[in-house]
Amino acid sequence: MTQTPFKVVQVVYELRAGDSGGDVIEKVTQEKPAEFLLGAGKLIDEFEKQVSDLKEGENFEFQIDSDNAYGQVKEEAKVDLPITAFQIDGKIPEDLLQPGKILPMKDQQGNPLYGRVVEVQDEKVKMDFNHPLAGIDLYFKGEVISTRKPTKNEIENKKIEGEDEEKGENKEESSQ
């Protein structure tokens, strides 16, 4: 991968599954445009490549196949965990293990990851740790609202200033 020069872009877009006729996955509007730090390595490489040379007011429309987005669904990322792994103070909270619910967890090395509850049985919970968009081709159509050079601080920290405070959390970019 060629390193994209650092640049802050604000975009509005519609993300669809597959192609221009696919189901809408996400719609980002003028009221709350998405802001990304290109070159920080937090976005899909192909997304960065497609928008990096665009200027304010330019439109974009492109498709990213699943292999170049979040990859294919990996069966080994679907696992059964003992139900006891979800106990807090010896009990499992009532609303915790709901099919479809995304739970923050950690792998064996302590790295954070998210898993979706697939099925709850008496002794085990089937979890899916694939990215929710794994196996899906992505179709983006949108416009660059603004661009600017990042501050030295943004480059050093590889995030846009105020990003954590604005979202109210310490979260890596969701378009990852």
Image (cartoon, rainbow, N blue to C red):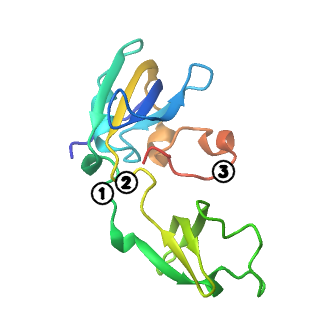
Give the residue type that dot 2 points to.
Answer: Ala
The image quadrant of residue 124 is bottom right
Q: Is residue 44 above or below residue 80?
A: above
Sooner in the amino-acid sequence: mark 2 or mark 1: 1
Circle 2 is placed at which residue position? 134
Please report the residue visible at 49 percent of the width from the left and 40 percent of the height from the top: 154
- Position of residue 172 in the picture relative to residue 15 (left or right): right
Sooner in the amino-acid sequence: mark 3 or mark 2: 2
Please report the residue visible at 68 percent of the width from the left and 43 percent of the height from the top: 165
- Tell me if mark 3 has few (under 14), some (14-19) or many (20+) residues whose alpha carbon lies within 10 angstroms of its own: few
Q: CA distance from mark 3 to mark 2?
A: 24 Å
Circle 1 is placed at which residue position? 72
- Position of residue 2 in the picture relative to residue 164 (left or right): left
Sooner in the amino-acid sequence: mark 1 or mark 3: 1
- Position of residue 117 in the picture relative to residue 53 (left or right): right
Circle 3 is placed at which residue position? 169
